[in-house]
Image: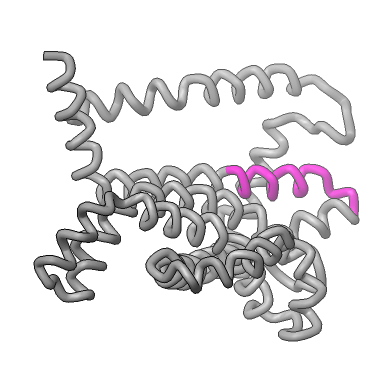
């Protein structure tokens, strides 16, 4: 197990390590104002984020990101189940949420400022709005793709509704739901910065924007580096959660591949 994990980590990390080494060497003796040496950026990163601005800027951004993603997940799965199981309601609501889905979460930042002010509530709302649509659509597609024979069997055996949802419908739709959630995680990282660019007093996006405005180039690159690390870490954590929740699904796929090979 440990050897397999180490091999997988080596396969995934060798290219980033080589890229960092190449950039480190290539920028060591450069005099460019806009592209400082990576060593200087790393030193600035250490001074700023280990651990000077962790509590004041990084933690609020991560907290808003997680809160918005949780809200989007709960509402997206709940609304997706209702819309997928009620054909008439889905047909009536489809034009509405297609219109709303076409409006990017970034453009709602001014609206959020007017309605909710400059606090964290506005940022959480923007992140939740921008990340809900992949989860909602994934839930609808997952539920609607279930085998009609399974639904008929549940009805014929008079299985209670809550058991249908928890033991059959949600597990059967979970691959599509989690596929949408993975997209939402990536969108949420982008919306962290977008929500902190306007009328904000803290956060990773605020630090990055202030560094850009004052031409503090190493500080600007260090904020971008932290954002990349946050995006990569959130993706790794999500893959671990996905592997755990879908262990039955991957087991069925592996069993099917083994049966077809034999």
At a point 62% along the width and 69% down the height, the residue shown is: 56
x, y percentage for residue 50? 56, 53
Q: How is the image coloured?
A: one colour
User: Which secondary structure type mostly characterizes the magenta part of the structure?
Assistant: helix
- Residue 14 is left or right of residue 214, and the answer is left
Q: Quadrant of the N terminus?
A: top left
- Residue 71 is left or right of residue 172, and the answer is right
Q: Quadrant of the C terminus?
A: top left
- Residue 250 is left or right of residue 11, and the answer is left
Residue lying farthest top?
262
- Residues 74 and 234: in front is 74
* Quarter where residue 103 is shown: bottom right
Q: Is residue 94 above or below residue 111?
A: above
Q: Is residue 5 above or below residue 188?
A: above
x, y percentage for residue 144? 39, 55
> Is residue 57 visible in this depiction of the protein?
no
Q: How many marks?
A: 0
> Is residue 67 visible in this depiction of the protein?
yes
Q: Is residue 165 above or below residue 10?
A: below
Does the segment drawn in magenta span residue 227? yes
- Residues 166 and 152: in front is 152
x, y percentage for residue 234? 47, 50
Does the segment drawn in magenta span residue 160? no
At a point 20% along the width and 29% down the height, the residue shown is: 254
x, y percentage for residue 248? 19, 44
- Residues 73 and 206: in front is 73
At a point 56% along the width and 18% down the height, the residue shown is: 18
- Read off the magenta span: 214-228
* Quarter where residue 55 is shown: bottom right
At a point 54% along the width and 69% down the height, the residue shown is: 68
């Amino acid at each position: 197990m440990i050897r397999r994990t180490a091999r997988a980590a080596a396969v995934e990390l060798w290219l980033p390590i080589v890229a960092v080494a190449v950039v480190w060497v290539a920028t060591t003796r450069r005099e460019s104002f806009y592209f400082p040496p990576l060593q200087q950026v790393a030193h600035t990163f250490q001074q700023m984020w280990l651990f000077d601005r962790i509590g004041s800027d990084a933690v609020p951004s991560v907290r808003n990101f997680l809160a918005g993603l949780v809200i989007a997940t709960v509402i997206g799965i709940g609304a997706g189940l209702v819309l997928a199981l009620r054909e008439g309601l889905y047909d009536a609501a489809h034009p509405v949420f297609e219109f709303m889905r076409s409006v990017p979460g970034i453009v709602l930042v001014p609206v959020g400022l007017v309605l909710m002010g400059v606090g964290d509530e506005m940022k959480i709302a923007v992140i939740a709005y921008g990340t809900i649509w992949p989860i909602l659509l994934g839930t609808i597609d997952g539920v609607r793709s279930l085998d009609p024979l399974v639904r008929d069997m549940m009805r014929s055996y008079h299985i209670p509704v809550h058991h249908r949802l928890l033991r059959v419908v949600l597990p059967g739709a979970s691959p599509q739901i989690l596929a949408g959630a993975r997209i939402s995680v990536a969108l949420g990282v982008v919306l962290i910065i977008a929500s902190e660019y306007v009328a904000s007093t803290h956060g990773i996006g605020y630090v990055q924007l202030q560094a850009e405005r004052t031409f503090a180039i190493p500080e600007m690159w260090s904020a971008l580096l932290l954002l990349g690390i946050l995006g990569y870490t959130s993706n790794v954590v999500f893959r671990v959660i996905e592997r755990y929740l879908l262990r039955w699904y991957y087991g069925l796929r592996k069993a099917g591949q083994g049966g077809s090979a034999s």
